[in-house]
Image (tube, rainbow, N blue to C red):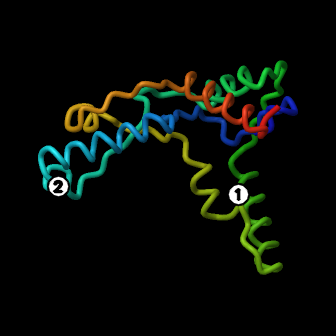
């Protein structure tokens, strides 16, 4: 994705659904787990897995649109490529990295991740067992993140 240059590149033609968590909420979830341990003992959460998100499901396009809005970028060209193009690019990139003795960002493992259509987290156990309540939705999180990046000179 290169929204600053008015291009949003994605792969796969099926809609993609995602969940997100803002860092402040992640910290809140960690504190909820620690509080549970301190008040009720480690056995209450020992060996349990909790997924954390803001509790909503978003499309990848919604995410792209929010970033576009926060960066103040208009008229974005949305390009979708078939998954086989990503597979080819990852294979070539991995091969070149192997020849050079380096590691490629785009490789077969990355292909497996990028080709997945949906990444959804069920936070019901966090809500009921730990009392975790998310405070930031994706729009607020993107806004806060963009503001932080701008204030630190990473975005203009």
**Quadrant in which residue 150 is drawn:** top right
13 or 106: nearer the viewer: 106
Any mark on residue 87, and which?
Answer: 1
Q: Is residue 65 above or below residue 154?
A: above
| Circle 2: element type | helix
- Left or right: 34, with 143 as reference point: left
For the point 47% across and 25% down, the residue is 136
Residue plotted at (75% across, 41% down): 81
Residue 84 in the image: state x and y as whole percent: 71, 52
Task: Identify the residue shown where x is 76% and y is 75%.
Answer: 102
Q: In this rendering, would 57 be left or right of 131? A: right
Residue sticking out furthest to the right: 5
Which residue matches tag 2? 42
Q: Quadrant of the N terminus?
A: top right
Name which quarter of the figure residue 32 lies in: top left
Of residues 78 and 129, the one nearer the viewer is 129
SS for tag 1? helix
Number of residues whose C-alpha sits closer than 10 Å to that of mark 2, classed few (under 14), some (14–19) or many (20 or more): few
Identify the mark nearer the N-term, 1 or 2: 2
């Amino acid at each position: 994705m290169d929204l600053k240059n008015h291009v949003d590149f994605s792969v796969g033609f099926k809609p993609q659904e995602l969940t997100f968590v803002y860092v402040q909420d992640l910290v809140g979830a960690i504190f909820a787990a620690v509080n549970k341990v301190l008040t009720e003992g480690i056995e209450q959460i020992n060996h349990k897995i909790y997924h954390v998100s803001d509790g909503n499901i978003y499309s990848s396009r919604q995410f792209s649109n929010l970033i576009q809005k926060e960066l103040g970028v208009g008229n974005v060209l949305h390009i979708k490529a078939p998954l086989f193009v990503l597979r080819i690019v990852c294979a070539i990139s991995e091969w070149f990295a192997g020849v050079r003795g380096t590691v490629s960002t785009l490789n077969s493992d990355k292909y497996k991740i990028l080709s997945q259509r949906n990444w959804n987290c069920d936070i019901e156990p966090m809500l009921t067992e730990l009392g975790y309540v998310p405070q930031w939705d994706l729009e607020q999180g993107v806004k806060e993140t963009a503001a932080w990046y701008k204030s630190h000179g990473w975005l203009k």
